[in-house]
C-alpha cells in the first residue's frame, strides 16, 4: 500500500480530494433545494386544505404560513451548520493529510541524504586507510590523506550527533547541564577546528574576551558548528566568513556571516523546518540532511534565545544566535 501511495502524485490526490469535496457541497445544496421545494408544495397543499375545510380563515392560513417559515428557517440553519462543519472538517483533513504527505516526502529525502552522508565519509576514510596501508607515501601525501580521513570522520561524528540529539530533544530524554562558561573561548575553539579542517578557507573573527554565559556548552557549540558548516557549504571558497560575538547588557549575540548567494525570501522560514532543504538544485547538490538548522533552532529556543536570519551586504546571509547571559 505504501509503495502504491508513493507512486501516486500529490497533484492527482489533490484533484480527487477537491472533486469529492465539490460533489459533497453540491449534494448538500441539492438536498436544501429539494427540501425547500417540498416545503413550498406542503404550504400550497395545506392552504388548499384549510380553504376547503374552513374557507379563507385568516387565522388558520397565518398558522400555515408561520409553520412554513419555521420549516424554511430550520432547513437554512441545518444546511448552514452542515456546510460549515463539512468545510471545517475538510480544511482540517486537507491540512493534516498535506502535512503528513509533506513530512513523508521529507523523511524519504532525509533517509536518502543520510544514507549518502553515511556512506561517503566511511568510503573516503576506508580508501584513505587502505592507501596508507598499501603504499609507501612521502610525509606530505600522508598528511593530506590523514587530513581528508579526519575531515570525513568529523562529518560522520557531526551527523550522528545531530540525529541522536534531535531524537533525544524531541522525546525529552536529553538532560541539560547548565553551567557558566566563556562564550568567546568556545567560539574561538569552534572556528579553529574548522580552520584546521579547511585551511583554504578564510575565517575572520571578532571576539571580545571575558564574556560569560550560562548554558549547555556542548549544545551551543553544536549550533555554532552547524551554522559555520552551512556557511562553508554555500559560500565561495575565495570569500571570507565572518564569525563574531557581541555583548548587549544581559544578552550575547553570535553572528555567522557569509558572502554566498543568499537565501530567497520565500525560503527564509522554511529552512528552519525539520528535514527541509532549499529547492534550488545547485544547493541540493551540497552535502547535508536538512536537520542542522531545525536542531539549532530547537537548542536555541530551549536556551530561551532566538535564531535569526538576515541578508548580508552586498550579498549572502547572516545567522544570528541571541542568548540571555543567564538562563
Image (spheres, helix red, strand yellow):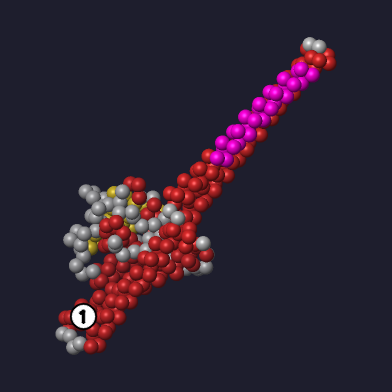
- Magenta segment: does it hold 120? no
SS majority, magenta: helix
Magenta stretch holds residue 44: yes
Counting from the top left corner in percent of width and height, residue 229 is at 30, 64
Q: Residue at x 18, y 88 (%)?
A: 136
Residue visible at 63% across and 34% down? 31
Q: Is residue 14 left or right of residue 321?
A: right
* SS for dot 1: helix
Q: Is residue 141 above or below residue 63?
A: below
Residue 287 falls in image quadrant: bottom left
Residue ID for mark 1? 143
Question: Residue 132 in the image: x percent, y percent?
Answer: 23, 85
Residue 163, image x and y in percent? 43, 68
Give the magenta part as a residue range.
23-49
Between 156 and 9, the one lying in front of the other is 9
Residue sitting nearer the eye, 10 or 143: 10
In this rendering, position of residue 5 left or right of residue 247: right
Q: Is residue 235 left or right of residue 298?
A: left
Amino acid at each position: 500500500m505504501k509503495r502504491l501511495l508513493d507512486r501516486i502524485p500529490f497533484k492527482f490526490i489533490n484533484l480527487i480530494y477537491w472533486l469529492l469535496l465539490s460533489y459533497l457541497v453540491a449534494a448538500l445544496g441539492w438536498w436544501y433545494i429539494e427540501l425547500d421545494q417540498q416545503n413550498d408544495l406542503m404550504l400550497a397543499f395545506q392552504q388548499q386544505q384549510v380553504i376547503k375545510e374552513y374557507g379563507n380563515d385568516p387565522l388558520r392560513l397565518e398558522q400555515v404560513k408561520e409553520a412554513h417559515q419555521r420549516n424554511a428557517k430550520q432547513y437554512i440553519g441545518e444546511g448552514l451548520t452542515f456546510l460549515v462543519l463539512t468545510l471545517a472538517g475538510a480544511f482540517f483533513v486537507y491540512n493534516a493529510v498535506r502535512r503528513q504527505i509533506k513530512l513523508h516526502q521529507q523523511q524519504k529525502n532525509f533517509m536518502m541524504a543520510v544514507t549518502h552522508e553515511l556512506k561517503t565519509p566511511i568510503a573516503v576514510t576506508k580508501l584513505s586507510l587502505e592507501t596508507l596501508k598499501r603504499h609507501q607515501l612521502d610525509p606530505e601525501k600522508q598528511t593530506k590523506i590523514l587530513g581528508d580521513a579526519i575531515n570525513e570522520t568529523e562529518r560522520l561524528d557531526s551527523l550522528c550527533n545531530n540525529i541522536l540529539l534531535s531524537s533525544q530533544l524531541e522525546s525529552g530524554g536529553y538532560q541539560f547541564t547548565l553551567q557558566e562558561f566563556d562564550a568567546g573561548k568556545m567560539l574561538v575553539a569552534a572556528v579553529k577546528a574548522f580552520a584546521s579542517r579547511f585551511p583554504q578557507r578564510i575565517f575572520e573573527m571578532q571576539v571580545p574576551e571575558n564574556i560569560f554565559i550560562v548554558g549547555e556548552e556542548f549544545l551551543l557549540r553544536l549550533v555554532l558548528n552547524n551554522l559555520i558548516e552551512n556557511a562553508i557549504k554555500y559560500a565561495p571558497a575565495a570569500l571570507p566568513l565572518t564569525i563574531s560575538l557581541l555583548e548587549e547588557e544581559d544578552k550575547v549575540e553570535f553572528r555567522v556571516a557569509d558572502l554566498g548567494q543568499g537565501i530567497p525570501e520565500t525560503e527564509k522560514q522554511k529552512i528552519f523546518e525539520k528535514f527541509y532543504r532549499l529547492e534550488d538544485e545547485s544547493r541540493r547538490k551540497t552535502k547535508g540532511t536538512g536537520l542542522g538548522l531545525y536542531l539549532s533552532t530547537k537548542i536555541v529556543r530551549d536556551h530561551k534565545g532566538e535564531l535569526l536570519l538576515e541578508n548580508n551586504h552586498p550579498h549572502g546571509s547572516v545567522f544570528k544566535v541571541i542568548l540571555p547571559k543567564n538562563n
